[in-house]
Image (cartoon, rainbow, N blue to C red):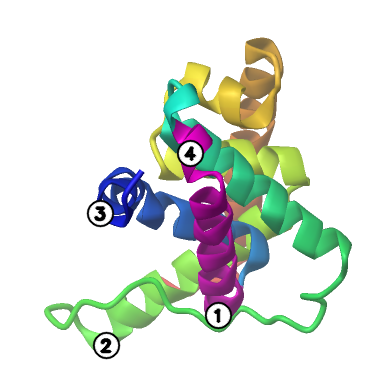
Amino acid sequence: MKQQAFLEKINPVKDKMYRLALRLLISKEAAEDATQEVILKLWDREHKLKDYTNIEAFAMTLTKNYCLDELKAKKNNNLRIVHQNYENKSISLQKGLEITDELNWIDKIVNELPEQQKIVFQLRDIEQLEFDEITEITRMKPTAIRVALSRARKRIRESLTNKHNYGITKN
């Protein structure tokens, strides 16, 4: 496979790979490094890519596994949440701060989820992947995926409800 053909297959998936890596590794720099490493791994296997029916699922699986390996190696212990995912100039400063606070709170909640729930939530609710694709990426049974997703959503909902009920945010 020539480089151009390889890039045509990988470029549509690259952003999803990055977002999954960012969700797992938290740091933008670590996510960029992970995405590049996985793309290099894919390039090393470029002659075998035609054997895979779903290159996106394969790339996402490699990304997930690479990130989990990085976390297990504790290379990323000192990472902090340093990214801001929201910017909109047309809203008031107060409203912008409230939205940023809410997004940071949700990000914190998601990052505290168990790994399986975090991965399933990212793939389904953020990346909008279908359950069969998530099954292929995670090697989990569909029932286990639904349970993990349900638990993740419930935990996020409860945490947000508790935050608002205890007056952590000011309206």
Q: Which mark is residue 47?
A: 4
Q: Nearer the viewer, residue 27 or 60?
A: 60
User: Measuring 31% from the left and 53% from the top, which residue is drawn there?
Assistant: 7
Question: In the drawing, does residue 85 fall left or right of residue 160?
Answer: left
Q: Give the residue furthest to the right.
A: 73
Dot 1: element: helix
As drawn, the residue found furthest toward the left would be 90
Position of 164 with respect to 94 (left or right) is right
For residue 22, say whether it is visible.
no
Side (left or right) of 154 relative to 15 = right
> What residue would you read off at disc 2?
93
**Pointer 3 local density, CA inside 10 Å: few below 14, some 14–19, many at least 20:** few
Crowding at dot 2, Cα within 10 Å, few <14 / some 14-19 / many 20+, comes out as few
Amino acid residing under circle 3: Gln
Q: Work out whether 167 lies above or below 143.
A: below
Q: Which residue lies under the disc numbered 3?
A: 4
Which quadrant would the C terminus be assigned to in this image?
bottom left
Q: Amino acid at mark 1?
A: Glu
Q: Within 10 Å of the Cα at label 1, are there few (<14), some (14-19), or many (20+) other Cα atoms?
A: few
Q: Amino acid at mark 4?
A: His
Real-space Cα separation, disc 2 to disc 3, in angstroms: 45 Å
Marking on residue 29: 1
Range drawn in magenta: 27-49
Sequence-earlier tag: 1 or 3? 3
Front-most of residues 58 and 51: 51
